[in-house]
Amino acid sequence: MPLQKIQLRPGLNREGTNYSNEGGYYDGDKIRFRSGFPEKIGGWTRLSINYFLGVARSLWNWATLAGANLLGIGTNLKYYIENGGIYYDITPIVATANEVNAISVGFTTLVNTISNSTTTVVMTNARYMPAQNGIIKIDTEQIFYSTLTANTASSCIRGFNNTTAASHTAGANVSSGFFQWYDTNNDANNGDFIIISNCSVSSVGGIANTTINGEHQTFKYSANYNYVLSAPGSDNNLSNITFSTSSATNLANITVQNEYPVGLPIYSIGNGWGAGPWSRGGWGSAYDTGAGVGQQLRLWTNDNYGQDLVLAPRGGPIFYWTAANGTGNRAEYLADLANVVSSGSGVWIPHTTNEVVASDIQRFVIAFGANSYDSTDSNTPFDPMLVRWSDQENPYDWIPAITNQSGEFRLSHGSYIMTTINTRQEVLVLTDSTIYSMQYLGPPYIWGFQVLMDNISIMSPNAIITVNNVTYWMGTDKFYMYSGRVETLPCALRQYIFADINKDQSWQVTVGSNEGFNEIWWFYCSLNSTVIDKYVIYNYLDRVWSYGNLNRTSWLDSGIRPNPMGVYIVGADALLNPTGRVVYHEVGTDDAGGLSSLPISAYVQSSDFDIGDGNNFAYVWRMLPDVNFNGSNVDQPSVVMELQPRQNSGSAYGDAANATTTSSQNYVTYPQYTVQQFTGQVYTRLRGRQMAFKISSDGLGVAWQLGAPRIDIKNDGRRA
């Protein structure tokens, strides 16, 4: 028989059975298709050795008039601007007070000897420790506990914050790593950050005032407005100091600044105090996309207005960061800026919004979901379907008047505005059921709104993107595109993807483009995961799909940065002390996001195809590989190729009962063949009516692209 070429259709297809997709690819990870052929995706490297606090779900890149290339990063805990690899904290200060406070610090001792795996710790006096989600320190080991009842810490996680779990003897010192602050005005919520200054006492319990004066994170201690503060350090980890004494000291007239309250890292099902991380209440939870009433995760929107930045947390106020003030300055309430135009005692700038956007060409600042303007009432209710905008070229004037272009309009289709996106000629506005076109008309109407399509859906506020003037988004059960009309985007992975999404965590879904490879990447939580662990890629040039496993909470491909940027959670848990890091993608061949490079495991597997015509058993006795290693940076790069035969579509691959014989190389259930750059042929010994082909790699420095391998076949008779 002549050689049989293995040349398959590009793209992964999971819409039918394995055999019904004959001639295509069925499974893969960390691969893409270029010009019809599969290849391993590029590697990534960290933007900086530094990291930031919280789970980032917003990235925005712009340049100032002075040429500074800035990256805005919105996390559930803070908002940062990255410049030159340094993350500057610009989280707004929302309250400042001068108060007489008492600060108590102390330590206790261990009652019983514990091993390195004990999960319950009993102490002699745990008075100054938080009732839940606390951290203690014994010798050099940090221990996280979920609950504290009397003097017993339960559900402990040993060796926390990369310390080493160890045995400890009874009587050992146990440091709480906290000091207590009495919040007399009840300004700080659980988990929020505050900044203490003007502490004049030189030392409190062995802790210098240089440590007390600084930023701290609050944790609930009791119902009478008492809070326990984390001790700050070079890495902001908790419990990184050991107290030398226990005391209570009155401090005269210290200054306490409250940062904007923190939000949740993930969607939390439930309601009320204690339902979710940081024991926070239902802030920002009005629009529940999961089962029951829950607490929504923190999402930021951000856009540059010239060289400045407008930003807003979903369900919060609009803030403004002035570039001329430098990265050492924080964002401020837009309503508090000196240039703001006011009228009467009412509300002139929205005090609550779901999204803020600066229109690219017309130069308006627009709030989607807002409270209506009222010159006499500062407590006008929030309307999730109301659109308000500032005067043109003036973000400080939101008062409608005949002499300006400020105004508002209420949408009617849907129950709340989910998200918006700027395109070349219009702003697309998506509610939970409808897509609108918002176009500038000029005076007297200013903005016009047109329904483009009803009965659509969108998975999350961050699930939409515009590429080459075509807008794509992930719905709740399919993908959409808009290029002048709304259409369903055909997807060869639709059944597979939407059957494996955790809908309770749908608002974590985020999207980004990879323009160099004509790709759109959606990241989502798989069915049994509460953190992002999967992605799906659409190649809009070749119109093919692929998918895989990867944790990226946000993604941005900016024309003023050298490569696409992704953000991932440092460590294994997004809920306990989360931190994040930005990486550049399509750099090298490996995972260089950490302190050392790790290999990227990549593979693609075909659907079953017939050997010959599939009527008779065939004997495959050799394979002629076709693979290049362009881009590899290691000597002798290699891949593993597999031929997986079976008797029929219902039998197992490589089952011995199906007359499969062993390979001349490495015997496993089915043959594997190590292929290098100049491997001309490999000898095989296998039989079957149909088979699948797989190529994989897991070595450092390896890049590859598959071509069209061939197999040499002999007829081997006909067996029932």
Image: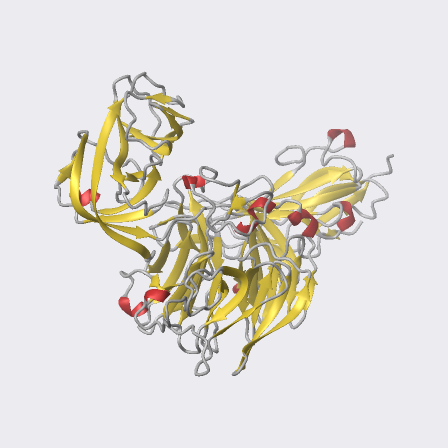
Q: Foreground: 695 or 132?
A: 132
Residue 685 position by quadrant: top right
Q: Where is residue 22 shown, x and y percent of the image?
A: 76, 50
Q: Foreground: 169 or 675?
A: 169
Residue at horizontal 25 percent and vertical 24 percent from the top: 108
Specify whether residue 351 is in view. yes
Q: Where is residue 684 shown, x and y percent of the image?
A: 69, 40
Q: Foreground: 91 or 237?
A: 91
Residue 340, placed above or below residue 17 = below
In this picture, residue 326 sits left or right of residue 75: left
Q: Where is residue 34 shown, x and y percent of the image?
A: 60, 60
Q: Foreground: 241 or 68?
A: 241
In this picture, residue 545 sits left or right of residue 182: right
Residue at horizontal 69 percent and vertical 65 percent from the top: 487
**How many marks overall?**
0
Specify whether residue 88 is in view. no
Q: How is the image coloured?
A: secondary structure
Q: Where is residue 147 shown, x and y percent of the image?
A: 40, 29
In this picture, residue 331 sits left or right of residue 556: left
In this picture, residue 273 sits left or right of residue 681: left
**The C terminus lies in which quarter of the figure?**
top right
Residue 622 position by quadrant: top right
